Amino acid sequence: MIWENIIRRLNAVKCLTAHIKGTRLSTKDKSSYYRSALIIICSIVEGLAYEIVKKNTPPPDHFFEDTQKYSEVCNIRSSVLGTTSDVHLYRRQKVGLKINDEGATFARYNLFLKHNRIVSSGQYKTLDWMRRERNRLHIQGLTKADVDYTKIKIKRAAKAISFLISKV
């Protein structure tokens, strides 16, 4: 199923870039089309990273990272202690993070690939750059106009698809 979705998304990128070539657009408008294409490419790369992590972790749960879980075991009211605030005691438990858990993110997939030497340091840097670029879709965190998407960025991102496909 992932391959069908990758092909569909690559066709969408092809349509976007063909439109840019075939139409007289301002630099700002081109940037908008390139942004859309880059977000689609990033979704492909994240999907490939997921599949590689899945391939390199044991089924059925595909634990790929140890993390900490905190559970409250006691709440002591401030009136009992004579303090200005309540005291909460927590138990820390080491748990495995599953590939489908909420905390399983593009960043964590990338780190798994790096730490397990599935990608090189340079490839990791490209993946992390892509994650940061993809996260720019969250407009509340932007501090300047979001108009610097270019053909060069699209080509850089597309290289990640190439090096990841060989590892799936």
Image (cartoon, rainbow, N blue to C red):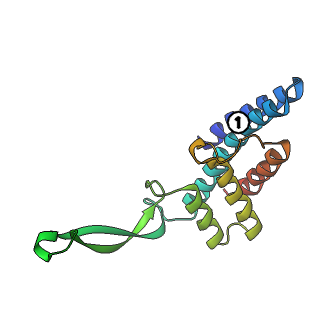
Question: Of residues 32 and 54, which is closer to you in this image?
Answer: 32
Density class for disc 1 (Cα within 10 Å; few <14, some 14-19, many ≥20) is some
Looking at the figure, which quarter contains the N terminus?
top right
Q: Is residue 122 visible?
A: yes
**Residue 67 occupies which quadrant of the picture?**
bottom left
Q: Secondary structure at mark 1?
A: helix
Q: Give coordinates of residue 75: x percent, y percent.
A: 18, 69
Q: Give coordinates of residue 49: x percent, y percent.
A: 62, 56
Q: Is residue 127 above or below residue 39?
A: below
Q: Is residue 167 visible?
A: no
**Residue 138 occupies which quadrant of the picture?**
top right
Looking at the figure, which quarter contains the C terminus?
bottom right
Q: Is residue 113 left or right of residue 163?
A: left
Task: Give the residue number, with chain letter if any, for mark 1.
Answer: 36
Q: Residue furthest left?
A: 80
Q: Give coordinates of residue 64: x percent, y percent.
A: 50, 66
Q: Is residue 23 above or below residue 153?
A: above
Q: Which residue corresponds to the image point at 10% horizontal and 73% vertical from the top-left?
A: 80
Q: Give coordinates of residue 48: x percent, y percent.
A: 64, 52
Q: Please, what is the three-letter code of the amino acid marked with disc 1?
A: Ser
Q: Is residue 151 left or right of residue 50?
A: right
Q: Residue furthest top?
A: 23
Question: Of residues 166 and 12, which is closer to you in this image?
Answer: 12
Q: Which residue corresponds to the image point at 84% horizontal and 42% vertical from the top-left?
A: 151
